[in-house]
Image: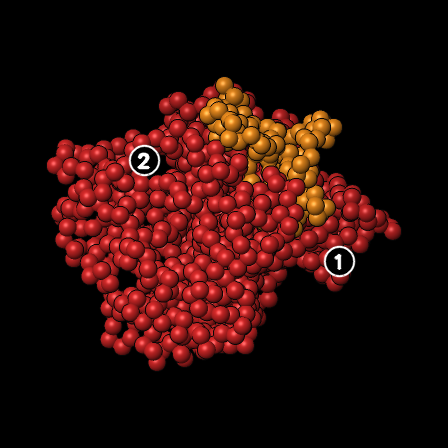
Chain colours: A orange, B red
Amino acid sequence: MLLIYCPYCEEERSELEFRQAGDAHIARPTNMTEMTDEEFEAFFFLRDNVKGLTYERWRHLNGCGRFFNAARDTVSDKFVTTYKAGLPKPDISALRPATEATVETYEATESNAK
Amino acid sequence: MSGANRIPGAGRLTPAKTARFVFDGKSYAALEGDTAASALLANGVHLVGRSFKYHRPRGIVSAGAEEPNALIGVERDAARKQPNVRATVQEVFDGMKVISQNRWPSLSFDVGAVNNLLSPFFAAGFYYKTFMWPKQAWKHVYEPQIRAAAGLGVSPTEDDTDHYSSRYAHCDVLVIGAGVAGLSAALAAAKTGARVIICDEQAEVGGALHYDKSVTINGLEGFTWAQATAAELAQMENVTVLPRTTAFGYYAQNFVGLTERVTEHLAKPDRKLPRERLWQVRAKRVIIATGAIERHMVFANNDRPGIMLASAARTFLNHFGVAVGKKIGVYTANDSAYEAAFDLKRAGITVAAIVDSREKPGEAVLAEARKLGIEVLTGHAVIETAGKLRVSSMSVARNGGGRGRSIAIDALLVSAGWTPSVHMFSQSRGKVAYDFESQRFLPGTYAQDCLSVGACNGTNDLQATIEESLAAGELTSNASGFTASQKTELQGSNAFAWTGGMAGAAEGAGPDTTVKAFIDFQNDVCAKDIRLAVREGMHSIEHIKRFTTNGMATDQGKLSNIHGLAIAAETLGREIPKVGLTTFRAPYTPVTFGALINHSRGELFDPTRKTPMHALEEAQGAVFEDVGQWKRAWYYPRAGEDMHQAVNRECKTVRDVAGIFDASTLGKIEVVGPDAAQFLNLIYTNSWDTLKPGRCRYGIMLREDGFVYDDGVVGRMAEDRFHVTTTTGGAARVMNHMEDYLQTEFPHLNVWLTSATEQWAVIAVQGPKAREIIAPLVEGIDLSNEAFPHMSVREGKICGVPTRLFRMSFTGETGFEVNVPADFGPAVWAAIWERAEPMGACAYGTETMHILRAEKGYIIVGQDTDGTVTPDDASLSWAVGKKKPDFVGIRGLRRPDLVADGRKQLVGLLTKDPKLVLEEGAQIVADPNQALPMTMIGHVTSSYWSENCGRSIALALVAGGKAKLGETLYVPMPDRTIAVEVSDMVFIDKEGGRING
């Protein structure tokens, strides 16, 4: 079970208190009615399935109730940082440890075998 | 006497403290502190089970958690019995009932043993090849047959009457394992003042000190030192010592799961105590001191009862005082097994020979063996064993061939060396590294804040282990800001340093042989199976594992993985690390469902939500239904009525007289603030600017994709205050949806949202006499139609308590919804009922509510809509503000698919035969005579018998439905095809006059 730092409570709390809420930094357009179908598709439907660093929204549901953003590594499942909603993407290179322990994966084992 | 093989003066158990237990119907004596394994061995019982696949007789292999063979059922009573318990960890208690498994009719005569003769047909991977066809047979013939034949224990069928508990704990240092390493580390950490938890899976701390009597630490015999140290630790306020506690899983950020077996060893446990306790520990640092597990030798017929690990035989002798045989042989590739021979010899047991596969054993152990007069055959191998239900002889030959010489024995102690227990380290996602010199996997790259110490870290020497562990204890404490005032010092010594070890098949079980040389006892995997898997093209160790099932049994390959890997590497012609190690996963040893579930069962499985009036409704005879977590009154049968009759009566009564209904479960959100109306404009399709305080409006909420998300009536209490209602099931997600938009998309709006679902009790009073019923109870509100028209809200008092009184209707009748603070709900319900009952009104439940709303064509979001329905599909276009510049879903509604012709639209359906009630979910076709598969054009969403209409009614989603009014469609059912006519959605009071009565 992960510990997640809530940027509003300024405290690490158990994952049980939080809910993931989709990708971050996708602002709802202010000109909704003028969007083309393609623009709407890109805004609402299309998402990257990132392997590695991803930015996502979380809600401290069973806590302060606030939505915030997080930078998380989908491979190591580690939170790199969390920050308040509305803030720009932080500079991750400054926050990441230089060497990340790699995770044992089936693919890695396979390549060993070859 | 507690067994003929108990050696007087040996072991640490107290001869006077006896217990009796039953094994397969026969009563045996044991001593307190015995495991089922030690007690059976004390009584000369080696045969304890049958193997999984071949049903071969099997005995006790180990003395610990790694046991692959000796799985037993342990029974207290019919409800409290547990299958697949390892006999080596189950402590004996007086009156314990033990049952052997996987044999029929008895352990010594097992019909399933015919599998052993048929074994050429059961080669590795045979499941995948043999049972391919016919396809149907897998489900109905093969799988049930295989499951019956290849089995483990039988689960109890009764509910478990034990209870289990759960605890969260935080500490600076968690020490896993309480052998020399763990205790040393815990001691050093504890003395700094850090919060320490130390756990060990065994009943008593000590680890390897259980068997190694030669160890002394600070002048004390090793095991005695361990108990003294544990006692010292237990008295410290900052330390928790947990014996009988297994760390089974190592999760992210030093979150470790432990199970503590609280009463498993007690004859008459206090029923107040939990059987097991789950500990969820969050540790700042973890010290892994899990030791090492001895491997067996891989040679022909190495699985007979009586063949066991050398360290296990030492444990049985030195701790339990039990000799595992009268004339023993030793087969080893490692020095440690010699010490087992020495201990047994000194206890008066005959040691027939030590067979060592190496030409050059350690000099010290060799000299000691000679001194004790034990024959040592170096450069020799055991190439065969004999004995039906217990080993009776071994065949010994020189390495490289030659005829075997048979030596009579009744137990054979084996050791191929030690495998460091890197399970916890690997589970923490640390990467193991192969050490070529010592031929073992050791902790390599760490991924979490933990340290491995002692044998699991590859440290062999006793004093080195102590010093490494003391340093780790201090270091991990320092990380939490604790420092020691003085250094902890421990001096240890033991008899011999060990050399040697091998992995893979021994002499006589090599690639040119077809002997049954078992590597995985529990899954009956032999050396030749691994080779077969490689020949058949499995080159990854993960494939080999799955093809052969090596390491997939409940022991998860604690003995077999390294042997399997070595044989695979040899067959592939690669180095071991190039073949790779399979991933270690939780749990380390099996965990009971009881421990994991603990309190979350029965009534505590999920919260039950009851409305404030629940008890009154119960007293009125309500039958309840589950709606999410809520219990809702479903219908109120009177004497002699079935559900159908009760519901028909309720439906009639509401329209003829009146009815009262508990609507408290509706979601309620208080939306407050200067920008409240603007916020609702964005959240709902409707416009709220024009809604005056004191008036209500039915609102529709969409998702951004344009589909209906929720609906409900919203009352404007004041310019800046709205009382929003949602569907019962949607309350939580609508609140989340609103918060999401308010916090992240519209943060400039000055609005507060408060969930008020449980703050209000809601009593709906519906029907022609509704006003008459409540009028005398209401103060300060003019209830006349003119002053208080349909879709209005007023604040005043009812029965003397404050109310928000809504004039609204989900039945099509004149209706009121009385909102009062939750605590007043029962009193107000009672007062209303007191007036309603003499007038001939009734209380009605959710079933009647559903029918009455369907008679009026009111939809239920989630029943008549399914997340692909637009407001227009549901004939609710009128509720979408056409002039609004923006709302959630405005763009989605204009998507090509959502404005296309032929969309499924909600319509009414009337069966041609009015008595027939359609099935909800039934499919609809235009032409019942078309070829299969038919083109389905929709489905029934709601369907009821309407007593008020005197016929059945239904709502359905039908492609292009609104253009099909009056047309005949068909509902094909298994036994007949039902003709239906498409109608509008209102079945009663089409003009809608009753609502304004």
Residue B367 image offset from top left, x and y in percent: 65, 38
Residue at 40% over, 75% down: B773
Tell me the chain of label 2: B
Mark 2 surroundings: few (<14), some (14-19) or many (≥20) residues within 10 A: many
Q: Nearer the viewer, residue B768 or B661?
A: B768
**Label disc, if present, on residue B863 of the rendered structure:** none
**Label disc, if present, on residue B238 of the rendered structure:** 1
Total label count? 2
Q: Nearer the viewer, residue B808 or B585?
A: B808
Residue B302 image offset from top left, x and y in percent: 43, 39
> Quick one: which residue is furthest to the front in this view?
B786
Q: Is residue B204 left or right of residue B726?
A: right
In terms of secondary structure, where does tag 2 sit? loop
Real-space CA distance between mark 1 and mark 2, rounded to the nearest whole angstrom:
68 Å
Residue at 24% over, 54% down: B953
* Residue A84 visible in the shown view: yes
> Which residue is tagged 2?
B903
Evaluate whether label 1 is on the same chain as label 2: yes
Tell me the chain of label 1: B
